[in-house]
Image (cartoon, coloured by chain):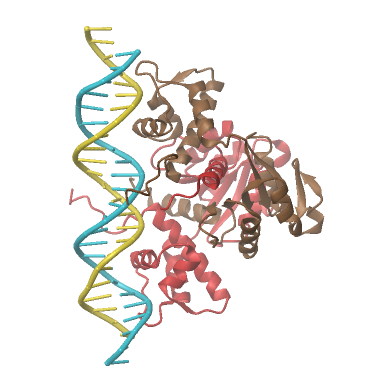
Chain colours: A red, B brown, C yellow, D cyan
Amino acid sequence: MNENRQTANLTVPARVIGRLSIYRRVAAMLQGEGVTTAYSHEIAAAAGVTAAQVRRDLMTIGAQGSPTQGYQLDELETSLGEFLDAPAGQRAALVGVGNLGRAILAHFAGRRPKLGIVAAFDVEPDRTNRVIHGCRCYPMDELREVVRREDIAVGIITVPAAAAQPAAMALADAGVRGILNFAPRTLHLPASVHVEDMDMTMALERVAYFARQGTPRS
Amino acid sequence: MNENRQTANLTVPARVIGRLSIYRRVAAMLQGEGVTTAYSHEIAAAAGVTAAQVRRDLMTIGAQGSPTQGYQLDELETSLGEFLDAPAGQRAALVGVGNLGRAILAHFAGRRPKLGIVAAFDVEPDRTNRVIHGCRCYPMDELREVVRREDIAVGIITVPAAAAQPAAMALADAGVRGILNFAPRTLHLPASVHVEDMDMTMALERVAYFARQGTPRS
DNA sequence: TAGATTGTTAATCGATTAACAATC
DNA sequence: TAGATTGTTAATCGATTAACAATC
């Protein structure tokens, strides 16, 4: 068991990656307010986690703070960017240009230079061969070609539930390695493809349940 | 520590509630295919979890299966509904009728009779005093009155990041007990208000990271 | 019956929290 | 310096997994 331990790139749990993304958002926000340094408990308060968690997470990526000054926010933002972003950037494609798909295109348009949605796909002819929120929309049968040409690594699924699995397969077959799935259906894909579900119905039902019962103390 | 243990309604972790919501979706889907009973491993496969987890979760809500037949899907769906839904139903309000807000209104329109979005709010005059995707849109200064009149228990926040905290406060002050937050900002609210974050940017960055690094084996 | 599945407890695993010496 | 904060390890906590007798 010792011989196959990972040496070069440590494995970081998904939970931690999510928090790092939030710390980056917080660092940008604080800098926007003119703040240049922040203590772990200040970052923690803005991120909604504990100070100890912030320190441990930042230790993971090798970001260091000063015991008297805290963390230098511009350095921190750089460190987080180097960890979270691909050096050469990554490109994403969206499948399903309905109401939700369009909203997501608008939401991400120009937000992250290192991670842009560069193509969208749909089965409906009246949604394709045009530009929506700055993103070119192609018919589904061009997916494979466009994904390869544009070197697209990430897929976003916003099709109806019944169409989700075929859409995911098409993306995976074309070479996509990660999928953000908004459709209320569990996707079955090779283990080499990382899937994250954004199930709005589930989330809303959970909120409704705890609105009634009260939040557990965890 | 023994004296204040909960007796009547057991506390169920958020993770479990989320899975129960998924089992309900699976039960509905299988019934739509004409299936009447399913084993835990069949439900598990469709839900993307382990069979042992399905059995343990269903045990939590007192749903029983037969060792030879598995679970009766119509009974299961009823049990899950009785557990997840408020007997008299619950009403939700959405704040922020932009692209994402409209998409969510369309997404939930008529989907769950026991949990409907019955009001929307916005600061923009040209978005208010009209009906969008079947939902009446009010100006923000009517929020308190409408939330109380319609007995709204759940809020959905789809405003820009800078407007999220005031919107959350307005909802909490009006009596909302749970909030589904799509804005990329951590909300600070009394502990009595349950908050769930749907951070699309974080989720996409996480997918992009694991698309590059490979999924951890967890 | 035989056998796969269920309900339920014990063992394992991983993440969070607590603690504390080192630091500026 | 004094003192709050940092980096880092040990203890705790909770959830998942493994195991197995009971069931139809």
Tell me if I can see residue A66 in this picture: yes
Looking at the rendering, which quadrant does residue A9 occupy? bottom left
Relative to A63, does residue A98 appear above or below in the rendering?
above
Quadrant that contains the C terminus of chain B: top left
Residue A106, percent across and down? 66, 54
Relative to D20, does residue D4 appear above or below in the rendering?
below
Tell me if I can see residue A130 in this picture: no
How many numbered marks appear?
Answer: 0
Which residue, as the protein is rendered here, is positioned at the far front? Answer: B3
Q: Of residues A34 and A84, which is closer to you in this image?
A: A34
B155 to the left or right of A218: right
Residue at coordinates 26% horizontally, 54% vertically from top-left? A6
Q: Of residues A209 and B20, which is closer to you in this image?
A: A209
Residue at coordinates 57% horizontally, 40% vertically from top-left? A201
Relative to A68, does residue B18 appear above or below in the rendering?
above
Residue B39, percent across and down? 40, 22
